Each structure stands twice: as structure tokens, then as C-alpha cells.
Image (cartoon, rainbow, N blue to C red):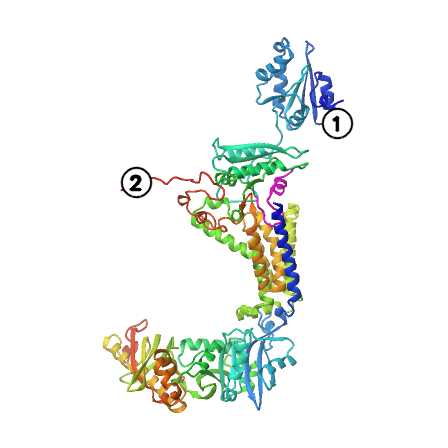
Amino acid sequence: MSRFTRRVGKLLLLMLVWSIAASAVSGCWNRRELDTLGIQLGTAIDKVGNQYRVSVQVVIPSELSAKAGGGGRSPVAMYEATAPTVFEAFRKLTETSSRKIYSAHIRVLIIGESLAREGIANVLDLLSRNPEARTDFYLMIAHDAPANQILKILTSLEKIPAENLFYALDTSAKTWAPTTTVTIESLIEQLVTDGISPVLTGVRLEGKARQGENISNIQQADSRTRTRITGLAVFHSDKLIGWLNENYSKGYNYIMDNVTSTVGHQTCPDGGYIVMEVLRNKTKLIPKVVDGKPVIKVKMKQVASVADVECKIDLTKPETIKMLEENGKQRIRGVIQGAVEHVQKTYNSDIFGFGNTFHEYKPKQWEKWKDDWDELFPQVKLEYDIELQIPKVGTTNDAFQNYLKK
Amino acid sequence: MNASVDKRLDRKLMSNLSFIRASFGNSQDLVIKEMNNDNGLQAALVYMDGLTDSTVIHHVILDYFMSEEQTASRKSGNRLLYLKNAVLAVGETVTISEWDPLFYQLLSGWAVLLLADSPDAICVAAEGWKDRNVSEPTSQVVVRGPMEAFTENIATNRALIRRKIKDPQLWTEGMEIGKITKTSVSIMYLRNVADEKIVEEVRKRLGEINIDGILESGYIEELIQDTALTPFATIYNTERPDTIAAGLLEGRVAILVDGTPFVLLVPALFIQFFQSAEDYYQRADISTLLRILRFIAFMITLLAPSLYIAITTFHQEMLPTSLLINLAAQREGVPFPAFIEALAMELTFEILREAGVRMPKTVGQAVSIVGTLVIGQAAVDAGIVSAAMVIIVSITAISSFVIPATSMSISVRMIRFVLMGLAASFGLFGILLGYILLVLHLNSLQSFGIPYMQSFSPFIWSNQKDTLFRLPWTKMRTRAVATAEKNLVRQRPRNKQKI
């Protein structure tokens, strides 16, 4: 027993020595209380002349607390600094901010269009190197507006503009095909992978910028100034080269298998529209070599339902559903074909990752094509194998418009 | 006077009586009743007032006088024997000729009959004093199960156990511990189940105790535990006879101490402190869930404040964004670092708890009102502590009451503060460090030669039926390997009718 007691005594002594030693060598333990942090939720980076302008959006927690309610002040504060490098600009922020800017919880990073055209690699390096940042934020490109201006627009449903942008993109990517979410990890992966170029979602400003900064912007139900997530920015390497419109963006997302749910319409035989809701979608790209030329077979399985009938059509007949399925296939085909042809002709940037598909499934063939892929990409032909099922028509059968009283 | 004279009773009654008087310093509660009759035969009845049953005393005197005529003709030696065997038919009697045991019996509530011209005294069992009745347990309450608890009387306690285990193999050994208090202590075990080595170890450790007084089983617990250098109890204590009976059936050894309703049970394993008697009376599935719940509560009460400190001061990136903003909003304007805030709140709670235990019942309400108002409402409203911290401290406190054995929740209370300190200086790394040390320490503990963490480390598969889980009784056919080395089988498989 005494031997045992000695052992425990030794252990306690060891503990003591450890904790003393550890507290002596710990040095820069970054202990920080919550109330000493400026929690940064949004970042905007612009290029101004030769310098980077970094704007950060910091929450004012007391304005957001449930108890205090809005005191009529803005729930966020913006800090800006301009410096020759991004990191210097970040540190320079402390000149104006009373608290250390804590960047781990950043939700969105908005990159100015002019900066994106010059290349975003330098900016990304700093962010991917930062050990404290979470990597679940989204990147966006400010379309037709300075990036910092986008962040400044006050929003009402989400009190924090950065959160508003984050959730707006997150929700629309899930239910609306033309947008897509890109995190810094996937972006860097696409930048360094052969045979694929990245895209980023664009964000626009609607209304007068000055008005959006004012708290009065959120004091009315219909905010005068808002931000809109729209279109995709096409990159070649790390440089922005152009934009895709809504329809092309949809085609892009169909090919990339990003679509979980969306809505599209068809024209009825006798005029009017019938609207289909996509319930499930799965796309697979199968690379083929036909006559020594690259061919991509788009194999797609989609389940959709009828969401809205705005014409006279008899949904109770199986032939009608058959016809809708056929038309749907043609439409999807058209959307995809349009997007691919547009990108091939206008931008010649393999944002669909066709090259990467060859790399994965036909590595030997890819070795031969790798170096002149830029010339080969515009020649890629598409084959289609689209399967569309419409198993349900919603909670009614035939459209009541058919029985309207005259 | 020389020692040999001092030790034994004298032949002369008068000198014996004066020796007793002198020894007790004429204490008020010492009663000496001298009895003379026509033959001039003298006798004296000595007893302690308040420790004896008056009906027995009257019986002794009455019987003595009734039998006097027959007795008179006999010689002193035979007379004593005759009195003892034939007349004093009250129950237990012993003949004693030495002072020390005589005093012990006298002070245990026996009546001593001294006869003239006899060097021997007859001691008659006449204990009878005011005892608390067997009442409901107060520290280990169950919804379903026996509602009786041990009392301060060791004989009652032994009987309570005997009433549950009616088997001659339930052996009891008695001893007196404490040079002055001479407290009676019993060990009880099932001879055909308990490990003889453990029983022997208990005997040895109890025999080694050399102390002036034992007033509660806590004295014994500290004197015989394997090591004092641990916050954990390595001996189980309970006031529930059914828990002791269950322990005996598992091959453990019970130590009963006179004067306290808390009976000790050895060896004690870590897991035992999370098991409640009720686990065995309720359905197996709900018992298992409750046990898991207790472990969750154990973790909360051990770690909640330190995790809160570590995450909010070191690892803010681990929180979901909206939670972080919420917490930051609450902390806005709180003047203390999170650690000081937590420490102050924990201290306040500990003070309230201690006050709640000690204070007179009549002021209870006042204290609880002040407590809840000061801690909960006013402190948050004044912005001295954040509401989140109040929630953390409350859940910690409530969780600590879920652990069925108070000795374990006391240990956790102490360790919690150490972990909070580690969390405040090193964040999650500190907590991990403390946790590893805690696990190492737990694994180094033993209770009467049995590893404290037994069933988990060393891992014993067959014991898992009654550790974290409680299997239905039909599946628990054997006893735990740890304590019942021999006689493992508890249930024979029932004969299933083949169709």
C-alpha cells in the first residue's frame, strides 16, 4: 500500500511539474474572451489601383441579442484598409477597429470583378493558409459593383448582410438550378486539377448603393436596395473571363450534377405553359473516343412532377404524360447543348471538367490530349442519354381550367 | 492495590460495589440496587439507567427474591449456577469474573447481578434504550423498491439483512473497535460465495485499526481504504438493506458499524456508484437507458463548465456561427473573464448547496429564494454574469444529483474545479490532459485488491451484462467474476419444454 501511495504521490508531483512547465513555455497562448473579439462574418476584397482594399464586416453582438432588440443602430460595422498585400491590409484594419478581427467565422468572401479579372490565386493563398478560418464559407464575385458595396447593403430578414448572402446562395443552390455554391477548398481543387476550370457565383446590386447602406433601407417591407445572386462567373485558370446567363448557368449545373431541385417550363401544344418541378436529378458524364475525337455522353436520370398547369391539357391520359416526358427531354437537351456550345465558342474554358473526366476514365488518352486540350475542348461533341420520369402530377389530376365556366 | 487484585472481582460484595462506584466516579446513571433478605444474604443489581429495559430489571429482581428460599440452602458456587440457569430465564446470561468485560457488558446495557461471597457476577442481557424506528431511506430514494433503511442500532441492521437472506451461509463476525468507544462492528458475508481472500483482508485491516473511538462508518472507511490519495471512494456505503443484500449475493463483504445507518460494502468498483437499487426492480430496458443517462450526467457535471470555458476562450471556431454570435452578445459587458465568471458561479452554487444541507429547515425557503434570485435573475440582469453561464452552472449542478451515490458526486465536484483551471490555461488541450490523468488515476486504483475499473479495465466480457447495461434477469445467470470467485452460477437455466 505504501508503494502504491508513493506512486500516486509521484503522479501528482509529475502533474505539478508539468503544469508549471507548461505554463512557463506556453508563451503565446491565444486566449481571448468573446467580448474582445470582433467577429468577422463577411469579407470583400477589391483591387484599387495597385493596392488591395480589404473590407470586413464585423457583427455588433449587442445589436443582435434577443433581449436588447434593435436599438436602431446598424447590426454590423464595416472596416476597410488598403495595402499592397492582402495580409497587410488585414492587419492594418486594427488601425480603425477597437477589437481584434476574428476571421474564423467568415461566411462569404466577395471578390471584386476587377480583381477577379487579374487573378484570384494570391488572395486565395492567404485564406487557405489561415489556420483559424473555417472553410465552410462561400465565395462570390461582385458583378458590376465594387465588392465592398455588396457587403454594405443592409438586409432585413437576416440582420447580418454576410449571413443573408450566405443563406440566399445556400437556399437557391438547393432549389434553383442556376446558382451554385463554391467553398474555398473546392475552388482551389478546381484550380489545380487538370482539365477543369472553376466558376463562381456572381452577386449583383439592385437599386442605389448609397440608400442600401442606410438603416432606412430595412425599415420598409420592400427594401429599395438589395443584392441578387445571379449568373456564374467563368474562369480560365484563376482569371475571370466572362459571365453565364441564367439559362447557361442552369445547363452548367445540370452537367456538373449540382441540381437537386429546380423548376422549368414547357410550352403546351396549344399555347400556354406547363411548369415542371425537378424532384431528383442525377447526371453522369461518360467519356468516349469516336474517330479519335473526344465525345462526352451525358447520362441523366431525372424525376420531375407537374407543378403548375397554365393551359388546356388532359393530365389523366398516359399519352399526355408521355408527351410531357418527351418534351422535357428535348428541353433539357437544349439547355445543356446551349450552355456547352456557348462556353466552347465564347470562352474556351473547360468549366464542365470534360478534360478531367477523360483524365479519370481514360488516363492514357488524356496523356495524349493534355497539352492541346485548349484546342480540343471546343471540338468536344455531346451525346445524350436522358431519362425523364413524371410519376406524379401533384395533388390533383386534371387541371381545373378545363372545367372553367364560360 | 496490585494489578491482579484489580482485574478480578473480589469475594466481598461491599468491596466490589465500592470498586464499581469508584470506577464510575459515582456517575448519576449508574444504579446499584442492594438486596437483603431475612437470611441476611446480600446481593446487588448494577445497571445503567437509560440503557436497560425496566421490565427485564424488574424480572431479575422479582425472580431473584422468589427463588431466594430455594437458593438459600445452596452453596455460593452452585447458587450462582442455579440462579443463572434456572431462575433468570430472561434470555442471554453470562458469568463474568473480571472487571473489564463486566464493565463492557454493563455499559452495553446489561444488568449485573453480584452476589455476596461470590467472585463471579451474572450478567443479564437487559438492553433497552430509545431507538429510532426503521424508516424510509433519505439519501438513496427509489420509486419502486423496499422503503426501509438501516437504523443506528447494529442488531436491527443485522436483522434487516437477515430478513432478506435466510441462509445459514450468511456468516457474521463481530468485533469491538475503538479503545474508548468500544464500538461494535460486524462483518457479514455469504460464506459460499464471497472470496475468502477478501474476507481475510477485511478481517486483517479491521484488526489493524488502533484508534480511541469510532463514531461512524466513515472512520472505518478511511482507516481501511486502499489509498487515501484519491478523490474517489473505494468503499461503497449505503443505508439500504436491499443494496447490501444484493452486494452480499454478489460476493461482497458488508461492514456494519454500531451507531450509524450507513453500512459499508467492499470491494467497491467504479461502476457500482452509478447503479441504483431500483435498476434491478424496473424493466431491464429502462434501467439500461437510465444508466446511460447517468453516465451522460456524470460527463456533464464533470466537463460542462470546463468545456464552456475552453471553447469560448480558445476555440471559438468550433461553435456554429449563430451560437457564437448569441454567446458573444450575452458576454457583451460582462466584466470578468469566462473562467472567473464560471468560478464565481460555481462557488456560489457550492455555498448554496452547503447552506442548504446545514441550515435549519425553517430558513430553507428564505435561502432558496435569495439563492435563485441572486444567482439567476439579478446577476444576469446586472450584467455581472452571462445568462449562458447560469445555464451551464445549473445543468452542471442538476446533473450532479443524478449520480445515485453521493460519494461519487462529491468526487466529481472536486475534479471539476481542477478541470476548469486546466481549461482556462490550456483550452481543450488542458481538458484532455486532465482527462488522461484522471483515467490513468482511476486505472491505478484498487479496492481490496480488485482493480477499481474492473469490468472495463481489465475488460471482462461476461460482466458487461450488469455494468453500463442491465440485461433482463433471465440473461444474468452468473455472478460478476470480480467478486464472486467461487460459486459463479446464480441461476440454472430453466427447463424449456420441447414441443
- Give the magenta range: B214-235
Give residue A297's position: percent from left, percent from top. 31, 81
Chain letter of mark 1 equals B
Which residue occupies 75% across, 24% down? B22
Q: Count neighbours of disc 1 (C-alpha within 10 A) and say few if under 14, some if 14 to 19, many if 20 or more.
A: few
Residues behind callouts 2 and 1 on a single chain: yes
- Is any part of residue B353 visible from this angle? yes
With A147 as the anchor, is B95 left or right in this view? right
Question: Is residue B8 magenta-colored?
Answer: no
Residue receiving disc 2? B497
Q: Which residue is mark 1?
A: B25
**Which residue type does callout 2 highlight?**
Gln
Tell me the element at label 1.
loop
Q: Quadrant of residue B130?
A: top right
| Snapshot quadrant of residue A60 | bottom right
Quarter occupied by the C terminus of chain B: top left
Residue located 63% across and 37% down the image: B208
Residue sticking out furthest to the right: B1
Q: Principal SS element in the magenta part?
A: loop
Label located before the other in sequence (2 or 1): 1
